[in-house]
Image (cartoon, rainbow, N blue to C red):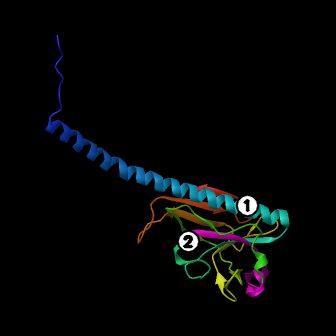
Amino acid sequence: MRMKKSKFSLIELLLVMVISAIMLGIVIPTFHKITKGVSVENGARQLGAQLKSVREYAITNRKYVALIFEDKGSSVLPADYSAVAFRPCIVTQDGSDWDAGGNGTDNSNWVEGERWEFLPKGAQIDDIKDLSERVKGITDKSISLDNKEIYPTVVFSPTGKCEGVGSGGATITVGETVEGEGSNNTVSIKIAAYTGRVSYEG
């Protein structure tokens, strides 16, 4: 006896397509949120690792070393990179400021082999608290910043101490890149004042 093959009706096919569209509508925003969260987490880990590396360099080489953050008011990098870029340089104390490169005359004060690092796409530096010191006189090849200040900055001493901060240390918050509004998804990096120890919150 021959079995009769069943065929799908147009209504059944449309019903499957509608259910698939609803499922995609639910899954895609959730997936997007998860990937943004991963960017923030990765960005915080990357920045934390760089802070630890700068501290170790300061201790090993017996120098004061700063991790410079590109600020929206400066002109080292294009505006698109503000709040996502950082780079270490060797500094000396000059009164109340930290001086790098003799007021813009020496390129050698960038830590050798280090370049501008960028947070992953979808992550940015939301906030930097309790870093009071500034670095002046940084140059980068053809870009001269004579007598201009770049800030904020984390400065580590040859003992590993985080300079220029209060007893509570400093906090750097990494969040999502959200246009025109605050980020709900954030990770805070705490830097202890006396030990320079880096830890994570959030």
Residue plotted at (27% across, 43% down)? 20
Residue plotted at (68% across, 78% down)? 133
Amino acid type assigned to the residue bearing label 1 in the image: Ser
Disc 1 or 2, which lies upstream in sequence? 1
Give the residue number, with chain letter if any, for mark 2: 83
Amino acid type assigned to the residue bearing label 2 in the image: Ala
Q: Measure the C-alpha gap from mark 1 to mark 2.
A: 20 Å
Residue plotted at (63% across, 61% down)? 47
Give the residue number, with chain letter if any, for mark 1: 53
Relative depth, front residue between 46 and 200: 46
Q: In this view, does 160 lie above or below 72?
A: above
> In the image, is 56 to the left or to the right of 18?
right
> In the image, is 1 to the left or to the right of 103?
left
Where disc 2 sits, the SS reads loop
Quadrant containing the C terminus is bottom right
Say whether marks 1 and 2 touch (CB < 8 Å): no
Residue bounds of the magenta highlight = 83-105
User: Which quarter of the figure has residue 174?
Assistant: bottom right
Quadrant containing the N terminus is top left
Where disc 1 sits, the SS reads helix
The single residue placed furthest to the front in the displayed view is: 2
Residue plotted at (22% across, 44% down)? 18
- Please give the label number shown on residue 41: none
The single residue placed furthest to the top in the displayed view is: 1
